[in-house]
Image (tube, rainbow, N blue to C red):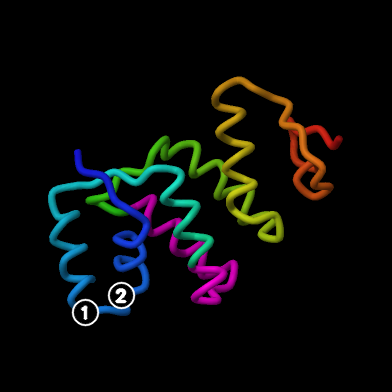
């Protein structure tokens, strides 16, 4: 299966360049894989560059999880991270995904100096 770079995923989400959006759609038409790294980077760009609010980031993540042509790396892990992010968007999606990746790998508790993150189950504030 093909894989996407962050800039291709962003074209699918933001649709701010007609030519690049069409090329991105054509590329994913037969299916494409989205890694955790690409997903986190895209969400960060949507927040930091495009100034999207938490509700818009949540909607984008939900759309990607339900997308027929895209396969997210460990979609169940992404969905679990999204559930945390929905409840506590101030944490940031990347922190939620870090916790869920560690949990899936069986490497918990997750140590953090972040007081808010350490408030989640299976974390430990240092």
* Above or below, comparing residue 14 to residue 33 in the picture: below
Viewer-closest of 49 and 101: 49
Residue in the picture at 74% in, 35% down:
121
In the picture, the disc for residue 72 is none
Is residue 48 left or right of 66 when viewed as pictured?
right
Label 1: few (<14), some (14–19) or many (≥20) C-alpha neighbours in 10 Å:
few
- Considering only vertical position in the picture, is 22 above or below 112? below
Q: Residue 22: percent from the left, percent from the top? A: 17, 70
Whole-percent x and y of residue 9? 33, 59
16, 100: nearer the viewer = 16
Q: Quadrant of the N terminus?
A: top left
Q: Residue 63's spot in the image, x, y percent?
A: 38, 59
Q: Secondary structure at mark 1?
A: helix
* Labelled disc at residue 15: 2
Which residue does the image show at 86% across and 35% down from the upper left?
126
Residue 54 as seen in the image, left or right of residue 79: right
- Quickly name the residue at label 1: 18
Q: Are marks 2 and 1 in contact (CB under 8 Å)?
A: yes
Q: Is residue 105 magenta?
A: no
- Secondary structure mostly seen in magenta is helix
Question: Against 12, is 118 above or below?
Answer: above
Magenta region: 46-66
Kindly report the distance in space between the C-alpha atoms of the residues bearing marks 2 and 1. 7 Å
* Residue at left offset 36%, top offset 67%: 13
Would you say residue 65 sits in the magenta stretch?
yes
Crowding near the residue tagged with mark 2, few <14, some 14–19, many ≥20 C-alpha atoms within 10 Å: some
């Amino acid at each position: 299966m093909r894989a996407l770079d962050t800039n291709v995923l962003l074209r699918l989400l933001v649709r701010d360049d007609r030519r690049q959006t069409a090329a991105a759609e054509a590329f994913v038409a037969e299916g494409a894989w989205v890694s955790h790294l690409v997903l986190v980077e895209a969400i960060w760009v949507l927040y930091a560059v495009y100034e999207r609010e938490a509700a818009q980031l949540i909607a984008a993540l939900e759309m990607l999880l339900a997308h027929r042509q895209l396969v997210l790396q460990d979609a169940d892990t992404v969905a679990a991270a999204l559930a945390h992010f929905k409840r506590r968007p101030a944490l940031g999606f990347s922190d939620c995904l870090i916790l869920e990746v560690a949990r899936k790998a069986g490497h918990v508790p997750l140590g953090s100096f972040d007081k808010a993150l350490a408030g989640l189950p299976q974390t430990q504030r240092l």
